[in-house]
Structure formats: structure tokens, C-alpha cells
Amino acid sequence: MDVNSLFSLEGKTALVTGGSRGIGRMIVEGFLGAGAKRVYITARKIEQVTAAAEEMGDRVVAIPMDISTLEGCERLAKEIAEREDKLDILVNNAGAAWGADYLEFPEQGWDKVMDLNVKSLFFLTKALHGPLTAAASSQEPAKVVNIASIDGMRLNSMETYSYQASKAAVIQLTKRMAARLVSDNVYVNAIAPGAFASDMNRAARDHGDALSGGIPAGRIGEAEDMAAAAIYLASRAGDYVIGHTVVVDGGLVHAALPTAGPS
């Protein structure tokens, strides 16, 4: 058994939405380390996504795009189809969050989050069905990895109503998409990250030491932790995993003991 080949992405082409920073960038750098031939990244801010691609090297190609709308999803899919005959891996990572008091929570904060985190994930994957199925076979399936969150599995203390609802939706949608696309040899899974330092998770970014005490592993996540999970699902190693959400959180969801109540 060649274990190295199990986790190799040699010759593979990938698209990582929101790949210029945070968890998306961790995944891109992991894919490059695993030998990916080319990784496309997209984000709304032109300067940011272009600079990130330049920093990561000539195997990373920036396509600035706002995929919060159906039109943006279809434009991105068209750009990929014009550049590539096939797409081996799609990582639906782009996301948004919104926090506000329950009685003040605005419609904008609901629609923005649900549109990007759920609607765009679905319609971008659908728009890329041609390139994904062109890469797919029973011996080498194409892979879709949706980025959910442990906030879709458990409550947190922040009033991020639409974010938590959207990530729970991603977990369930992953199962339904997996059931449909497996017959096309496109395998769909998800990752539910816990505390990783990013602009979206400022608590982990700015107060990682304080958060670590509540995590069974005793620390927040590192880039290698996220990259490893994504490589696993995207490579031959994950070929028998379909419709699953891999929780990468240092044990917070499944290994944290409840806080003792009053005696």
C-alpha cells in the first residue's frame, strides 16, 4: 500500500471559493503541498485575491468574483469552463456572518448570510456540474467539500442567528447533494471547523489563548489541521467517505464534558 499516494493531489485542478484568506487559504496551501496542479481562488475584493495568488505562487490563479448572487455563480462557472476542461475539486468555502440582538436583527443580516452560505453553495456546485462530471469516474471521483461550522451543530454565546441556521443547513444540504451526485461519481462532504484564527473568527484570532482553555485539545486550530482534513476528503484517502461532515474542532463538539451545574 502506497500511503503517500493516498493523500496526493498530483495533477488535480481545484477551485476554492474565498481562498484568499482564513480557512480558504489554509486549504489552498495544503492542496499545493499535496501536489495540486492548479488551484483557482475567488473572492469579491480584487486587490486581496490577486495579491494572495501572487504570494502563493504560479499554480494559484485568481478570479475576482462576487458569488453572493446566482449571476455571480454562473459567471464564475463560465470562467472555469473557459480555462479548464475539467474540475477535480470544488471547495465551497466563501461565507459571511452577522451578529445582532434578536429584537434588532435585520433582514439584511439574514439574507446576506443565507444567500452566500447556502444558496450560492448550491447554485455554484450546480453550475459547475459539467466540469466536475468531466473529471469524475468510478475509479477517480470528483470531490466537493463544503465548509460548514460547529455552529451548525451546537449553540454559541453570540447572537448570530442566520449564521448558525446557515451552517446547519449546509450540513443537511451536503447529505442531500451527496445522495444525488454520487451516481455522477461526484462525492460531496463537508468540514465543520471549530476555532481557527481568521477575519471571520476574530475571537480565535485575537483571543486564542483565552479560548484554548475551553477546548479539549487545549489550543485553537492551526493551518495544518484544516489543510489535513481538506486533503483527506479531496484525495484518494477519502474516496469511501460520502455525505459526511468531518468535525475539526479539537474535541469541542464530541469530547467536551458539560459544565457542572449547582450541587
Image: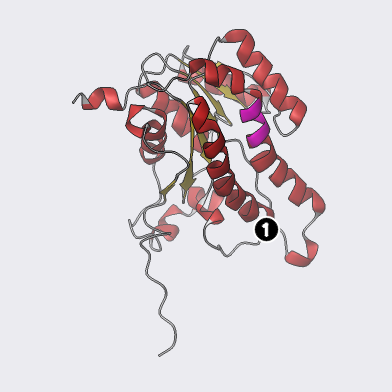
Up-down relation of residue 46 to residue 68 (above or below): above
For the image, the number of numbered tags is: 1
Residue 45 placement (x, y as % from top left): 67, 27
Quadrant that contains the N terminus: top left
For label 1, the crowd category at 10 Å Cα-Cα, with few meaning under 14, some 14 to 19 and many 20 or more, is many
**Residue 62 visible to the viewer:** no
Q: Is residue 199 above or below residue 85?
A: below
Residue 194 or residue 174, whichever sits in front? 174
Mark 1, secondary structure of its residue: helix
Please name the residue that numbered disc 1 is placed on. 161
Identity, as a three-letter code, of the amino acid under mark 1 = Tyr
| Quadrant in the rendering for residue 95 | top right
**Residue 97 rendering spot, x and y as whole percentages:** 65, 48
Residue 263 screen position, x and y as percent: 40, 90
Q: Write the residue at 58% across / 31% down.
A: 18
Q: For the view shown, which residue lies furthest in the front direction?
A: 183
In front here: 133 or 56? 133
What secondary structure do most residues of the magenta stretch adopt?
helix
Q: Is residue 38 above or below residue 238?
A: above
Query: In this orientation, does residue 28 appear?
Result: yes
Q: Position of residue 92 (x, y in %)?
A: 57, 34
Name the side, left or right, on which 150 lies relative to 124. left
Q: Measuring 55% from the left and 9% from the top, which residue is drawn there?
A: 85
Give the color scheme: rainbow, by chain, secondary structure or one colour: secondary structure
Q: Is residue 140 magenta?
A: no
Going 42% across and 34% down the picture, which residue do you hit?
A: 230
Pick out the residue farthest to the left: 1
What residue lies at 80% left-to-right and 55% top-to-bottom?
A: 106
Numbered range of the magenta stretch: 122-126
In this rendered view, identify the residue nearer to me: 171 or 252.
Answer: 171
